[in-house]
Amino acid sequence: MVEKMSKDRKKGISHRRLHLWMTLIIFIFSGTIIFFTFRLTRTFSRVTAAYDQYTELKSAAQELMNASDYLTEQVQRFTLNGDIIFLDNYFTEAFESKRREEAISKMAMNDDTKEALIDLQKAMDSSVKLMDQEYYAMRLVIEAKGYTEYPDVLKDIKLSEEDATLSAEDKIRRANELVLGDSYYDQKDEIRKNMQASLESIDRLSENTESAELDKLNLGIRITRVAILAQAVLIFVIMGLTSILAINPVLKAIEQIKSDEPISEKGSRELRYLANAYNKIYQKNKSSLERLNFKASHDELTGAFNRAGYDYLLSTIDMENTYMMLFDLDNFKSINDTYGHETGDKILIKVVKTLKKVFRSEDCICRIGGDEFVVFFAHTGEIERKLIESKINQINAELEKTDDGLPAISICAGIVSGKSAQNTTEFFERTDKAMYESKMRGKHTFTFYE
C-alpha cells in the first residue's frame, strides 16, 4: 500500500516545484525589465544633459556675435551724432565686459568642440581686425569734434594725410562711410559666416550625440517591449497551469461559490507595475522628441518666426525697451501676378536674408502674413532716427538689386516704441497706423513714432 502511494506521488506535475520554477523565471524577467527601465532613464538623462550642454555652448558662441553687433551699434551711433557716451560704451564692452573673449574661453573648455572653436576663433579674429577700421572712424569723429579726452588707444591712431586735411564735416562723412558702408557690412558678414559655421559644428556634434543616445533609447524600448510581452505570455501560461492544477478542481468542488479569481490574476500588482513602468518610459521618450522639435514656431519658407512665434514674442517682450517695425512689400501682389508665386517666394526669402544681414542677431524677425513682416528691436533703450533711416535705406537698396534675377522691390514701414503703448494690442495698432501713414505717402517710406 505504501509502495503504491509512493508511485502515485511520482506521477503528474509537482505544483510546488512548478510554482518555484515559474517564480524564478518571473523574477528573472522582472529584473531584466527593471534593469532596462533604469538604463532607459539614464540614457534619457544623458540626452537631456547633452542638449543642455550644447545649448549653453551655442549661447556662448552667439554672445560673440552679440558683442560684435553691440560694438558696431555703439561706433555707428558715435559717428552719427558724436555723443561721447557711445565711445565709452564701446570701450567698456571691448576692454571690461569682454563677452567675445568669454565666448572663446567657454568653447575652449570642451574638448569635443575643436572644430567649432576654430570657426569661432576666425570670427573673433575678424572682429578684432574690424576694430582697426572702427578705431580709425572714431578718431576721425574725435578730430572733427575737437575732443581732447578720449581713450589712450585712440591716441596712437594717425590719420592719413588726405583725411587729416578734410573739413570737420567731411571727416564725419568719411567716418560714416567707414562704419556704414558696404565694405564694413561685408566684413560683418564674414564674422557672421564664421560664427554660423561654429554654430553648425555644434549642431552637428549635438545631433550626433543625441542620435547615438536616442538609438540606445529606442533599442532599450524595443527590448523592454519584448520582455514585457514575454512575461505577459508567461503569466498566462502560469494562470492556465494554475487553473488546471488548482483552481478548476477547487471550483468544481464548490460549484455554488462565485469567484472572479482569474480576472484578478490578470490585474495583479506586478503586471500593473510593468504596464505603468512602460507608460512612463514611453511618455518620457515622447516628451523628449517633442522638446527637440522647434518647427512649430518658425515659417517653413523663410525661416523667420511665424504667426505663432510672433504671438509668443509679443506676449513676453519688455515693452519699455522694445521697438516694433511693421512693414509690407510695395506692389508685391502685382509681382506675384506678373512673375508667379515661385518668384514671390524667392523675394520673401531674400527679404528675410536682408533683414538678418542688416539687423542685430538679437532682433526678432517675424512673418505674420503673406508679405507682412514685423521686426522686434529687443533690449533697446532709444533708437536714433538716423540709424533707423540708414537701416531701412540699406534694406531697400538690397531689395532693389536685380543681379540675382529677381525683380526690384521696396518696403513701407512703421516704427513705434513700446513705451508709447499701454498694452501689446495698442502697441501693434500704433505700429500699424504708422505703416499706414507711410503707405499713404508712397513707396520706399517709413514713419517713426517715439
Image: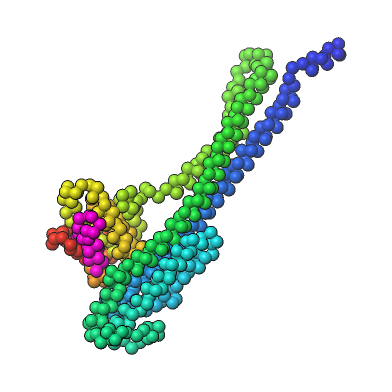
- Residue situated furthest bottom in the rendering: 148
In this view, the residue in front, 161 or 124, is: 161
- Identify the residue at horizontal 22%, vertical 47% (top origin): 341
Where residue 365 appears, as percent x and y from the top left, is 31, 58
Where residue 2 appears, as percent x and y from the top left, is 86, 14
- Residue situated furthest left in the rendering: 441
Q: Was residue 397 drawn as part of the magenta stretch in this picture?
A: yes
Residue 270 in which image quadrant? top right
Q: Is residue 306 above or below residue 19?
A: below
Q: Is residue 390 visible to the viewer in this orientation of the structure?
A: yes
- Identify the residue at horizontal 36%, vertical 63% (top origin): 361
Q: Is residue 315 visible to the viewer in this orientation of the structure?
A: no
Q: Quadrant of the N terminus?
A: top right
In this view, the residue in front, 249 or 197, is: 197
5 sits left or right of 74 in the view: right
Q: Quadrant of the C terminus?
A: bottom left
Q: Is residue 184 above or below residue 199?
A: below
- Identify the residue at horizontal 31%, vertical 52% (top origin): 302
- Residue situated furthest top in the rendering: 1
Segment colored magenta: 390-412
Q: Was residue 204 drawn as part of the magenta stretch in this picture?
A: no
Where residue 190 appears, as percent x and y from the top left, is 37, 66
- Identify the residue at horizontal 52%, vertical 45% (top origin): 214
Q: Is residue 222 above or below residue 339?
A: above
